[in-house]
């Protein structure tokens, strides 16, 4: 199991950031992803694997400042 | 005049000392950035690095810390003036330029902490990535979701290691921007910055005390 934004998600061997985004249905154009508090750059979503028990955050970024 | 007045008399204990030596970078001097800068100078931050390429427009005045007489001026210049009118001792480095990922680590090299105060989501994203890649041990405090009015209870602070996000994480500026809600998120970001320096200061003091005791 991993946690994504606090919610439990079943973990599978070799699961990448992109797999997690697909499973959660997160298709936001602009998103910030961290695994155990470490930022994963956009171009590494396909290759970065999420370890079991990881605490993942995936946040949609909004215009406005 | 500055030598004869103490504007920080009512600060919380240790705040003045902890903030005087601190340098904060602010990327964007609009609704978030201008209000954050004012808050930080009042709190006692010693040095600010301000970056914004834009000039003050009439539509900025519904939420940004500018006046009618500032219209047409560079935001970093008008803001610097307002900040030194509060505290003449604050050191300000103004950069009237359009920032990009490559320039970020150079312009903010001396910043202990970075405040993300851009309006476009794309810019927020590359700024966070550029900062974390260059300075993974230094915090970045971002605004995310501050549009509309009311709904105060949905504004919150989320922490992911050195990345802090303030806002509702939901609203987009297409629905309009209202002074109080923008100012609340700006104050949340400034408050998180102050808390960080107080925590560092306390940790440094504890370390030097341990050192003295060990001697």
Image (tube, helix red, strand yellow):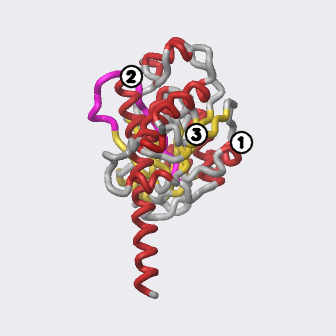
Sequence order check, earlier mark of 3 and 2? 3
Mark 1–mark 2 Cα distance, whole angstroms, equals: 30 Å
Q: Position of residue B44 (x, y in %)?
A: 44, 45
Query: Residue under mark 1: which chain is it in?
Result: B
Q: Nearer the viewer, residue A34 or B63?
A: B63
Mark 3–mark 2 Cα distance, whole angstroms, equals: 24 Å
Q: Residues within 10 Å of mark 1 (few under 14, many from 20)?
A: few
Residue B189, quarter of picture: top left
Q: Give the magenta part as a residue range.
A: B139-155
Sequence order check, earlier mark of 3 and 1? 1
Q: Which residue sits at x=43%, y=21%?
A: B63
Q: Nearer the viewer, residue B153 or B49?
A: B49
Which residue corresponds to mark 1?
Answer: B103
| Number of marks in the rendered image | 3
Which residue corresponds to mark 2?
Answer: B179
Say above or below: A17 vs B210: above
């Amino acid at each position: 199991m991993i946690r994504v934004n606090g919610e439990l998600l079943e973990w599978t061997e070799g699961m990448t950031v992109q797999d997690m985004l697909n499973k959660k249905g997160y298709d936001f154009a602009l998103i910030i992803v961290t695994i155990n508090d470490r930022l994963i750059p956009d171009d590494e979503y396909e290759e970065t694997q999420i370890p079991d028990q990881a605490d993942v955050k995936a946040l949609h970024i909004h215009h406005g400042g | 005049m500055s030598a004869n007045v103490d504007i920080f008399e009512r600060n919380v204990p240790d705040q003045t000392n902890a903030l005087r030596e601190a340098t904060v970078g602010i990327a964007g001097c609009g609704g978030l950035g201008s209000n954050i800068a004012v808050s930080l100078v009042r709190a006692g931050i010693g040095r600010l690095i301000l970056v914004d390429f834009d000039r003050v427009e009439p539509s900025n005045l519904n939420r940004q810390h500018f006046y009618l007489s500032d219209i047409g001026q560079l935001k970093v210049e008008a803001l610097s003036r307002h900040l030194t009118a509060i505290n003449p001792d604050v050191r300000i480095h103004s950069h009237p330029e359009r920032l990009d990922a490559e320039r970020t680590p150079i312009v903010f090299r001396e910043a202990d902490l970075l405040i993300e105060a851009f309006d476009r989501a794309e810019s927020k994203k590359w700024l966070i990535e550029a900062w974390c890649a260059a300075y993974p041990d230094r915090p970045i405090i971002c605004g995310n979701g501050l549009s509309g009015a009311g709904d105060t209870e949905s504004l919150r602070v989320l922490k992911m290691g050195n990345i802090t996000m303030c806002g509702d994480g939901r609203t987009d500026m297409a629905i309009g921007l209202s002074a109080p809600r923008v100012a609340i998120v700006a104050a949340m970001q400034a408050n998180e910055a102050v808390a960080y320096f107080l925590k560092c200061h306390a940790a440094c003091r504890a370390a030097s005390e341990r050192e003295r005791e060990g001697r």
